[in-house]
Amino acid sequence: MTETSASQMGDDEIMPFTKIRRLIAQRMVTSKATSPHALMAREIDYEVVDQVRRTHGEQFRAREGFGLTYLSFSACAVVQALTEFPLLNASWSDDGLIVHRSVNLGLAVDLPAGGLVVPVVSSAHLLTLAPMARRVRDLAERARGGKLTMDDISGGTFTITNTGPFGTFLTGAIINQPEVAILATDGIARRPVVITTPGGEAVVIRSIGMASVNFDHRAVDGAYVARFLARVGVIVAERNWADEL
């Protein structure tokens, strides 16, 4: 070792790994070693969602004490799509793919002290928008307050990670084993897009965001995931959200 390199190393600081950082590291390495990850993404039109948030947002906040987030809409759309594409609401086993009847939706939550935890919205397929928003809010608050129970973090069948509030463009998340897929919602922004009209084509301003799925290629093929993502997009754009508030 030269005198120069020793001096440079002397300027560094070793930050000991926390228990949760070591656990996350172990699980991420295990996941990548276990599942052949494949990534697929598509743009989602949130214009209808934005209209609902503008029209009903203040009334919802006054009633519930918190705002309507994009995540609640995305969660409902993903859950509905999973009921139609059940091979993604599944777990891998050596005996075969375990397809779950209930959609227990995991939500990756970043913790104030660092690290992640994935609380679960149990039986999410039974929830409409307002109840989903309440569950998302409750789990996130209790996660960041260190008040989750073991039941809150058990039994997940599919996970969403939401980095959109930080303005991300595309996220390739790592699968939460033994699940077979994870969906990431990225930043939503106003931008010009081309739409088809009865008179031809037009350039309009829409709220557009990216949704991406990292999936276990042992369990499903790309065409299945592509159809799932397309269905999520249709649900976000066409579901009658206002009736669920």
Image: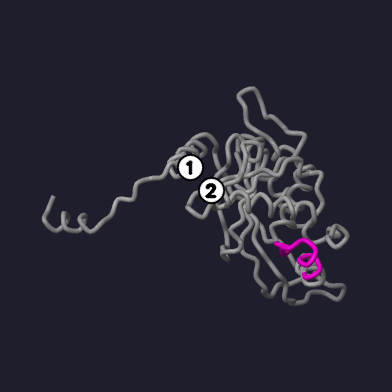
Give the mark nearer the N terminus: 2 vs 1: 1
Identify which amino acid the numbered label 2 is placed on: Leu
Q: Residue at x 78, y 67 (%)?
A: 62
Measured from the top left, where is residue 237 in percent x and y? 79, 61
Q: Which residue is drawn at 62% across and 64% down?
A: 187
Q: Distance between the residues labelled 2 and 1?
A: 8 Å
**Residue 232 appears in the rendering:** no
Number of numbered discs on residues: 2
**Residue 12 appears in the rendering:** yes
Magenta region includes residue 63: yes
- Vertical order, 18 against 33 (above or below): below
**Residues tagged 2 and 1 counted as in contact (Cβ below 8 A):** yes
Identify which amino acid the numbered label 1 is placed on: Ile
The quadrant the C terminus occupies is bottom right
Of the pair 77 and 71, the residue shown nearer to us: 71
Residue at image mark 2: 116
Q: Which residue is drawn at 86% across and 76% down?
A: 199
Q: Give the range drawn in magenta.
A: 58-69
Of the pair 240 and 85, the residue shown nearer to us: 240
| Residue 9: quadrant of the picture | bottom left
Local secondary structure at mark 2: strand
Residue at image mark 1: 24
Report whether 179 appears left or right of 47: left
| Residue 26: quadrant of the picture | top left
Q: Which residue is drawn at 62% across and 49% down?
A: 142
- Vertical order, 226 against 198 (above or below): above
